[in-house]
Image (cartoon, coloured by chain):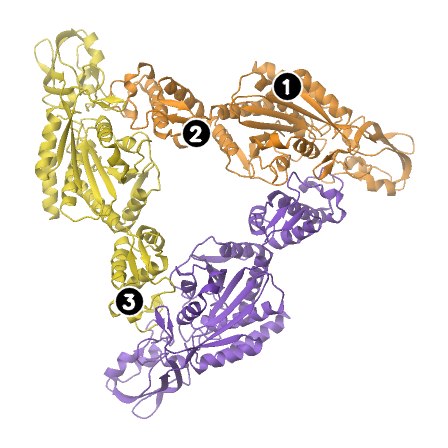
Chain colours: A yellow, B purple, C orange
Amino acid sequence: MNTKLIQETDQLLKKLFPICRSLTGSGARKTLHTLKKLCEFNIMDIPSGTQCYDWVVPNEWNITDGYIKDNTGKKIIDFKENNLHVINYSEPIDEIIHFSKLKKHLHTLPNMSKAIPYRTTYYKKDWGFCLTYDQFKKLDKNGTYHVFIDSSLKPGSLALGEGLIKGTSGKEFLFSTYYCHPSLANDNLSGIVLWILLYRYMKSRKTKHSYRFVILPETIGAIAYLSQNKKIMKKIKGGFVLTTVAGRQGKVGYKSTFLGNDIMDRIVFQTFKELNINFTQYPFDINGSDESQYSSPGFRIPIGTITKDKYFEYDYYHTSLDNLDFISAENLIKIFRIYVKVIENLEMNVTYNSLCPCGVPQFGKREDLNYPHIGGFQNQRVYDLKKEQRTLSNLNAMKWLMFCVDGKTSLLDISEKSNIPINRLYDTAEKLCVHKLLEVII
Amino acid sequence: MNTKLIQETDQLLKKLFPICRSLTGSGARKTLHTLKKLCEFNIMDIPSGTQCYDWVVPNEWNITDGYIKDNTGKKIIDFKENNLHVINYSEPIDEIIHFSKLKKHLHTLPNMSKAIPYRTTYYKKDWGFCLTYDQFKKLDKNGTYHVFIDSSLKPGSLALGEGLIKGTSGKEFLFSTYYCHPSLANDNLSGIVLWILLYRYMKSRKTKHSYRFVILPETIGAIAYLSQNKKIMKKIKGGFVLTTVAGRQGKVGYKSTFLGNDIMDRIVFQTFKELNINFTQYPFDINGSDESQYSSPGFRIPIGTITKDKYFEYDYYHTSLDNLDFISAENLIKIFRIYVKVIENLEMNVTYNSLCPCGVPQFGKREDLNYPHIGGFQNQRVYDLKKEQRTLSNLNAMKWLMFCVDGKTSLLDISEKSNIPINRLYDTAEKLCVHKLLEVII
Amino acid sequence: MNTKLIQETDQLLKKLFPICRSLTGSGARKTLHTLKKLCEFNIMDIPSGTQCYDWVVPNEWNITDGYIKDNTGKKIIDFKENNLHVINYSEPIDEIIHFSKLKKHLHTLPNMSKAIPYRTTYYKKDWGFCLTYDQFKKLDKNGTYHVFIDSSLKPGSLALGEGLIKGTSGKEFLFSTYYCHPSLANDNLSGIVLWILLYRYMKSRKTKHSYRFVILPETIGAIAYLSQNKKIMKKIKGGFVLTTVAGRQGKVGYKSTFLGNDIMDRIVFQTFKELNINFTQYPFDINGSDESQYSSPGFRIPIGTITKDKYFEYDYYHTSLDNLDFISAENLIKIFRIYVKVIENLEMNVTYNSLCPCGVPQFGKREDLNYPHIGGFQNQRVYDLKKEQRTLSNLNAMKWLMFCVDGKTSLLDISEKSNIPINRLYDTAEKLCVHKLLEVII
């Protein structure tokens, strides 16, 4: 199963990587339809020109070709070799121009001479090419060049993908990712693939809470989505932006919500503790992804992000070296499993009321609670240590629950105090409910 | 006086140690009556079968003899040598049985081969012997043994001891200990003896607050007491469980209340600071003593515990090696003195109102406040340093009090801020009351 | 300008140093009138005998001469050489007395044998001389001496200086200093000079908040002022006592307000951070200056103090060695500039409301906000780093503001979170107001 999932992930990454995605256009649409085949979700189209708060949905951009030819007619830069070569949202051009003019439209990374940078010009008409610094250095400063971009900028629409898994608790959580980057692997093809895997997994199980999965172009997409769903968003308790989850380089990371100690943050820290994961904690920063939109003053939804090589933190970020070699399906699935555990902990973070609040209950008289009838043991002095630890651990969960539960304290609270994993507290609490010692509140 | 108190303590420990105590029965009653001779308190009997919340008071257990004889008729295990040999609450038995059957009723400590463990079977009918691992190893695995326990389990009652020292403030504090352990010295003969000494001391002085002293069997006793005194318990502001206070091994310890920063905790920390005592701080844990009952959701009384070799923390815990050699009367009296100081600080933790809230008062015009009429000194530059420090210290107390007092801030609050001991603040505040600069609120 | 200000400061220090100031009298009045020439403020006279809360304004003290002559008629101690030689508020005397009687009226510092201590006897009739321990040792223990003090203690008045700079915000801040020390340079001639410079500077600029500058004798002056202005004081949000600001020895220091984390404290910490000043933090202490009056229970105004060699913390404190050699005009102006920056930060600590709370605004469509139209950069990968950093820094300020502003969060709050200086946030916020993205609340 594990191997099968990793193989499927690997194939999906390879299939989606070459597509030239952008805010809008056929690449974006092709990506969404590929994902949809794995698990059904809705796609909404928002027409170009639609006002979304301070923003307007831009024209749709499509591109079929783009190159620079030298005066011998040789293609020296070719969009078909790497779609990063043409600045995203470049307007069409077909001209012979001198190097001195061309230069202003070229983008390179002198400090990383073999990497093509990723550049965009979404909201101002412009055109340009991105190339390696090695390529740039070979250009003839007195030469003339044929620059050609076969793109179009016309009224069309922006596509938003949305899937809702309905629970019964009245609580809803958001999982958002962005699809607008072209052939860049960790940022953010990895996030796209994690998104569909997590959505499909969640659809396959019964959940107590509701989970809203959205996939959209960064910034304008999130703002457009918010503007169309203002009331719904007010009910969302928290969520995650799925991004940069498969890098091969650094540690697992967590970027906190703007609150820093919200339930979203605490449930992630608790999950890392339970999984014994050593991680880098990034404080909230205004620079990042769509948490800036979801957490903006009008919404204030606490949004966290679990990463494997977080954006900004690896050298290849936003360059052609953030390609399939930089990531691995294994790492992606590792983060997938963390998110699954986070969701399980969210599902099990119940608040109970006590039906036996005065003193500890007499566990011993309820046979299936396995309370040892011989007393007096000291933990360390028990000869059948293994069996005893299991018993003690169950006893501890029962005792902590019956001591803490008061209609306000959640299992997350009790877990943080007692160091007992949420799932063990949950299993024990459910057993205590059967015995009418506890009852569920929320 | 000190020596006399230590001698008296030592004698009391020796007198009470051999008695076979349990939840109920003649050993418990004999212990209570011995204590009562030192200082009068009430003994209430709760009949077997009485429902107490989730519990029922068990039958009374009495035991006169118990042994294992080998097939030569030789007593190889004898209750009369050490009352730990018979599991507490064992039912009677008189049988010749094979080792293979006997084995299931034997309890040893393989890692501590010279110690008899302490075991109980309060709520399930069973019988058994505890013996050293060295004794166990000598048994003939093919032999037969005569097992004999002359015990009885019959309707009777559970005894609760209670003494109330009434104050005038309307605030009440609880001091609880448990008498149910047989011949075990630190846990908890030491707590029993401290309890009677502290109760007698408190009865001998006038107090502002009320102090409720209870002595009972652990768990069932506390729950029975709570169930009979629910309304009264609601008025109790906090308290202490007296246990394990005379060990010879480790440091003074403090197990925090479930709140961790309650006035109970703060007054203990302040007292340790004033007495310059280096202590081990134990966080609240659900495993412990009757704080679990008093602090349970239905009561939430903050309960702390000051220890000398805390239960769980010493190797000999719940074994025959926790005997009179492991403890000392000197250590017990050391903890006695700490509790006395804690109580004195509780008594002096007054909240005042200011009658001169605008600016510092002119101390100098009130002759008996000893305000120096020559000004300009810098603390470090004073040649008669000793006298000056005393004066400065008095001045500081006056200044801090007049600055902080506002009808809400207690002397404990001021002491924590100013590092001036509560008793010095109290003496100074009382003087300032005479001068109508302060008045008592509570 | 800098040099000019330092020169002016230096001259002022030299001019004011020799004057024998006290709680009252001609020296105090001469000091106030010298300051008044630099910048107009009101002087109020409170008659001797006026009741001020627990205090009564004392008689006015004036002194013209004072000496000790030996039996050859030689002046061995002379007030005219150093006005510290006569205890402040000494009553007149003209007697020939034996050393054994004189001794009780002599004050020295055995540990600092070349320093004359500063001593006062404001509220009890007494007389005395202060002298160096070296001088004291030379006295003939069997000799007789002519002691002469030409002073007077008569009904008069106590002078309070007050200047008010009125703003429009409805918020008022207090800057207080004390003039009562005679020829002592750091404590507190430096505070007096800083007071007039800061007052003159504030009068020369337009302010949003109101600033109340008061100069008075320590303790009795502050209490008298409070008693006459009770209602006005209730509106004051916080302030500073200006004292000991020009020492040559130690680090810049800050004594916290009694709250420790008030806006006064936070604005000072933020200012030190912005100015990259390494400072010593002193917790609030009841021993100090007039913060004890302004922060007393009846007023509770949070008062901080920025120092250069804080009182109590330097050896020469309250001795003749705290003279012009110990201080420098440069240090005084350094603290002046810190206070100016603190005030600027107070002025700019605005709270805004957002007019675009849903998602980040589209900065790019507003040309003068200089939002770069090419996207995709990673900070570290930009080749024109210098220009880019400036842009990024502006962008960060815009983004943090639009993210945080919610009608409650102040620029100080945002500055602490974002590490962006208050003035940059302020400039950016004002620009965003022009674009109707923000609006001022307070």
First in sequence: mark 1 or mark 2?
A: 1
The one of B124 and C53 positioned closer to us in this rendering: C53
Residue that sits furthest to the bottom in the current view: B72
**Rendered residue at 24%/36% (across/down):** A232
Label 2: how many Cα within 10 Å (few below 14, some 14–19, many 20+): many
Where B330 falls versus B237 (above or below)?
Answer: below
User: Do marks 3 and 2 share a subunit?
Assistant: no
Under mark 1, the amino acid is Thr
The one of C94 and C209 positioned closer to us in this rendering: C209
Where C179 falls versus B350 (above or below)?
Answer: above
Label 3: how many Cα within 10 Å (few below 14, some 14–19, many 20+): some
Badge nearest the viewer, 1 or 2: 2
Where C170 falls versus C257 (above or below)?
Answer: above
Give the labeled residue for mark 1: C9
Q: What's the CA distance linking mark 1 and mark 2?
A: 36 Å
Q: Tell me the subunit letter for badge 3.
A: A
The one of C117 and A416 positioned closer to us in this rendering: A416
* Quarter the N terminus of chain C occupies: top right
Q: Which mark is residue C410?
A: 2
**Rendered residue at 75%/46% (across/down):** B366
Under mark 2, the amino acid is Ser
Q: Which mark is residue B85?
A: none
User: Do marks 1 and 3 share a subunit?
Assistant: no
Q: What's the CA distance linking mark 1 and mark 3?
A: 80 Å
Q: Tell me the subunit letter for badge 1.
A: C
Q: What's the CA distance linking mark 3 and mark 2?
A: 56 Å
Residue C125 visible to the viewer: yes
Element carrying mark 2: loop
